[in-house]
Image: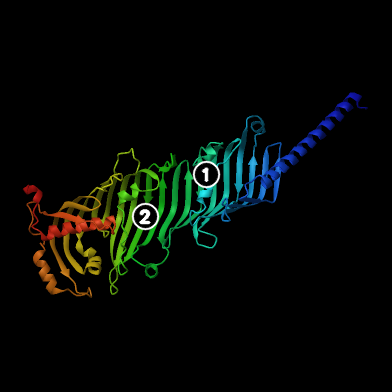
Amino acid sequence: MQVPRTAKIIFRILSVFLVLMALIVLGAQLMAKKSIANYLDTKLPPHIQLDYKDVDVNVLNGTAILEAIDLKIGVQDSIHQSAVAKIGAIEIIGLGYWHFLFNNKISVKNLNVERPVLIHYSKENNSDSSNTKNNHIALLKMIHIDRINVIDGKVTLLKNKKDSLVMQLDSVNVEIDDVTTNAEIINSKIPVKYGSFEFGSTSFYANLGPYEEINVAKIRVEEGNLSITDLQLKSKYNKTKLSWHLPKEHDYIDLKIPELSFKSIAFGYDKDQFWVGTGSGELNEPNLEIYRDKLLPDDTDRKKLYSEAIRKLPIQLDIPEIKINKGFIAYSERVNRETTPGEIIFGEVNAKIFHIQNVPEKKEKTRVEAKALLMNDAPITLNWSFDAKDKSDAFVASGTVKGFDSKHINPFLESNLRVRAKGEIQELYFTISGDAFSSSGDMKMKYEDFKFSILKKDRLRINKLLTVIGSIFVNDGSKTDENGYRYGGIKAERNPTKSFFNYLWINVSDGLTSTIIGNGKNEKRKK
């Protein structure tokens, strides 16, 4: 059967057309590949050096793949290098030609960054900052990417090429949706706008200075909620070796938090100030051990109260509530070489902290409501409030202790104060109001058969003479009002080189002295 002449002509035309289309597609791919290569080779700023193995382009589906990338970024007008990166591949999927040609817009469905390894060198001084401060990026087209995926990355921050590790994140995976920038946005503090954001990392390390570091097993950010697993903030040395490295007193710290979470995290810039806001936060079963070697020279640096510290944060912060569940705190001091450091323990710590914020227009005070078991035995409470924006650093604190047998705290008293106590504090209440300089308040106690023994220097034997003299001034709890209470006043001056908790302790200590040694009467009732 002979094929009609017309069909042959049509077949030949189609064949020629298909060949022409194939040549056009091939030419377009070659041109696109050459254009991309030419841009990467000639159009990047001189402080950015980019090497890569190959570029693969498919113009039919709008795909481009850049493989085996080696990127080096320097500081403009400087010989210093600020970052290097090795990237397995960058894949662009769904490049919108119509938007590119007619809408002055670069539109991409997916941008995948595979196995990036980024090393950034932090500046040791600001000598180069003036060269980059006023740089303006002239972006000619709007860019929109439906989704950016960073797959199995690693980020390392170094102080400089030869110095120690500052921060490191491993197995980093990121998903960002609806990413947009243009000529105006790209020169803002945050150079892109985006929709949803997800982040994950299997490990995080940060060097907090010469003495502490932080490690995290897992970080996850999803739908604005942050969860952290197995956070550890601890000293780099054990207690003995830390003292060898210290020129003055400094706490040994060992903090473990199995689970930490915050809801609804948001951040941005208000004019030139960076702000961070969250929903409620929660710390589950935190365990904190603090140790201080008091044989070292005193740390005479001025300490900020918490109100001042929050007020002077370099960012604007707003956290409405943090809950602490089933915490544990142990504090010990080494005051002499001969005895084991005494320890104060707070078990079953449950607390709520409200309104940690320094937002000028917000009036809520920061409040702490905490309860625990002193020496894992006696229920205690602490209520404490302050306004971080009040420059006087005024505060109010109140607390209670109930059913405390003093023998449980004797290891600490014997080691630190050369005192041994006997008797039970059935009830103790105190209220304190003060500021950055001084405080006052009152206390009432109900206690029974309370006695102190003063120890000799070896802390093993009782100094009978001083104990007898002391017993003359100490009331054992027998002289009380009709309800069984003795009362005392509180007057204290703050030592600005000490912490808030030292300030709180000297207030409680003054109240205990006044209550036990004084006349025990309620002076307010007299008035």
Residue 259 coordinates in the image, percent (x, y):
41, 51
Q: Which mark is residue 286?
A: 2
User: How far, Cα to Cα, is label 1 from label 2?
Assistant: 45 Å
Residue shown at 82% from the left, 35% from the top: 19
Q: On screen, 94 above or below 41? A: above
Q: Amino acid at mark 1?
A: Asn
For this view, does 178 lie left or right of residue 94?
Answer: left
For this view, does 485 lie left or right of residue 115?
Answer: left
Residue that badge 1 annotates: 134
Q: Nearer the viewer, mark 1 or mark 2?
A: 1
Circle 2 packing at 10 Å, graded few (<14), some (14-19), many (20+), is many
Circle 1 packing at 10 Å, graded few (<14), some (14-19), many (20+), is few
Q: Residue furthest right?
A: 2
| Tally of numbered tags | 2
Q: Quadrant of residue 473?
A: bottom left
Q: Which residue occupies the foreground of this view, 454 or 241?
A: 241
Query: Which type of secondary structure does the marked residue at label 2 adopt?
Result: loop
